[in-house]
Every structure is written in C-alpha cells, then in structure tokens.
Amino acid sequence: MNKMIRFACIFSLAAILPFALSAQDEEEKKEVPAEKKGPENLAPNGSFEEFEDGLRRKEQFELAKEWANPTAGKSELYATDVRSRYIAVPDNMYGNAEPADGSGYAGLTAYAYRGKEVRSYLQTRLTTALEERGLYCVKFKASLAERSRYASNNLSASLDKSQLSSKSADNLSSSNPVYSEYNDIVDTREGWWEFCALYRADGKEKYLTIGNFETNDRTKTIQMDLPEKYEEDGQLAAAYYFIDDVKVEPIKPGESCNCASDRIPESKIIFSGSVQMNDEMSLAEKVDAIDVYFYQYQAQVVSAAERTIDKVVEFEVTK
C-alpha cells in the first residue's frame, strides 16, 4: 500500500513539475525588463570600423564603407591591426588617440595656414532622408592631433539634400552649416571633444558632411606647442583632427540631445496669447493687435501663427 501511495506521489509530481517550471520561466521573463533600444543612428559606419581591404597608407579614406572625400583633398582612415605605422591606432603619423568608439577613426584637416596643407572633409549618405521639421541630434567626437601647429573653430557639420562636392582642393562651402553652441576653438588633445547640436530639418536632407566650411579669414585659430615626442617629425602648418563616433539621431519635441553643455533650445514657444478684435477697429489697429510667434531660436513660426498670417493677408485683400 505504501508503495502505491509513493508511486502516486511521484507520478503527480512528475506531471505537475513541467507546468510549475514553465510558470516560473514566464514569471522570470516578466521580471526581467526588456532592453531599451537607443535612437536609430542615420549615419552609417559612424565609428569607421568597416572598410575595404588594402588599407596600408595615408589618404585612403575612400576605403571606409559608406564614406567619401567630397573634394580633391584626401582624408585619412585609421585602424587597429594594420601593417603601417602611419595609419595605426593609437599611435600614428599625426599623433596618438584611442578610439572614442569601436576600433578606428578618421582624420581631416580643418584649417591650413596659407595653403601649406590641403583641407579635407568627410561625407556620407544618410540611411534615411530627414523628415520635414523633424528634430535630430547631430554628434561627432574630435581630437586635435599632437603634430598640429594650430587649433581652430568652425569644426561643423552640414546636412544637405544633394552632395557637396568640388573638384579642387579648396575649402568646401555650405549654405547650411550646423555649429556647436559656442563654436569654440577645439584644442582637445587628451581624450575627445564632443560636437553636439540640435537640428530642425527642412526635409529630404540626405547627405552629411563634416569639416570647416568657412574661409581662413573667418576662422579663429590659436597656436599649439609641439610635444617633445614629435619634435623629430615636426609640426603641421594646420589644424588636423581625428574624428569618431558620428551620429545623426531623430528625437521627439521636448527631448534632449544630452550634450555636455545642453543649452540647445528644444523648439518651445516662449509665449502665446489670444487676440481680441472687433469690427469697430481700423485695419491698422487689427494688424497691430496681431502677434506672430516663432519657435525658440528657429526660423519657423508655430502652426497657429500660420493661420494668423493668413488673416493679415485676408485683411489686406478685403481692404
């Protein structure tokens, strides 16, 4: 009899155990929070880790997948495990820098004294065109190469509907440059300086270009000392920067780009009020009573203001 009871207990336990374990697994799944995905980066290969075979020397930036040189000036691509001290990471021909992200980075000349060096730029096609009035965080990191005689400001990004390009090696101009908050002279050598800006899209921008889009006379510079380690190689008559961790990420209104100095306006309306008018008011009084409000630090008016502008036009038509 005891054997029968023992057998029944074992049989019941065997039948119940899988369901108990399954329920436990489900409970554990509920308790473990799902990983939150970060915003999508529209700049492909932003850490310059993917490149074609054959990287052995300087001026081979065209080997970086999804990136190109928009002018005759050639940029550089730096990587670990390459058979060349010129483009190695962290020590290379222009200085020393550990990657800000991943295992590689790029390099460009942002300023050249009296044309003694050639300016260069980095350009890529975004994975998706920007949406009209969409908000985007534009970021990249920069580090001044130790052999640079100069440090400069105007290190910026340009977002455009078509490619910026030039067959010459002159500086590239842009009608739509995006600057950091203070457009500082970037003299960071130890570690990385972060470019960070909030950008409101016109719509259909497809290309990102990084570099200096101003002429030399509109670029501020300071002279830098040459570290003893590089005295034998000498200084470059230029401001040369390593570039890494490039991002163009969509955000929602009210969200922050989380810049180091995050004073970037989030397109909020400073003030809005209603306008009271009556038929006894003259045309001039009606127009004077109407206020048109813009988004903070933006060229676009708020949607309600568009209707207000239409009202002013209607006044003039029916005058």
Image (tube, rainbow, N blue to C red):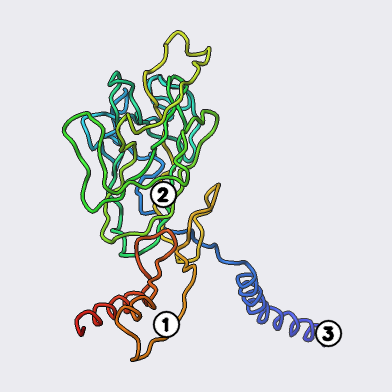
- Is there a contact, CB below 8 Å, between mark 1 and mark 2? no
Residue neighbourhood size for the residue with mark 3, other residues' Cα within 10 Å, grouped as few (<14), some (14–19), many (≥20): few
The span from disc 3 to disc 2 (Cα, nearest Å) is 72 Å
| Residue drawn 39% across the image and 60% down it | 298
Rendered view: 103 above or below 1: above
Mark closest to the chain's N terminus, 3 or 2: 3
- Which residue does the numbered mark 2 point to in the structure image? 247
| Residue drawn 62% across the image and 71% down it | 25
Give the percent coordinates (x, y) of residue 31.
65, 70
- Is there a contact, CB below 8 Å, between mark 1 and mark 3? no
Q: Which mark is residue 68?
A: none
Residue situated furthest left in the rendering: 167
The span from disc 1 to disc 2 (Cα, nearest Å) is 43 Å
| Residue drawn 45% across the image and 8% down it | 232
Name the residue type under label 2: Lys
Q: Which SS class for mark 3?
A: helix
Q: Nearer the viewer, mark 3 or mark 2?
A: 2
- Which residue does the numbered mark 3 point to in the structure image? 2
Give the percent coordinates (x, y) of residue 27.
64, 74
Q: Nearer the viewer, mark 1 or mark 2?
A: 1
Q: Which SS class for mark 2?
A: strand
Residue situated furthest bottom in the rendering: 279
Q: Which SS class for mark 1?
A: loop
- Which residue does the numbered mark 1 point to in the structure image? 275
Rendered view: 240 above or below 156: above
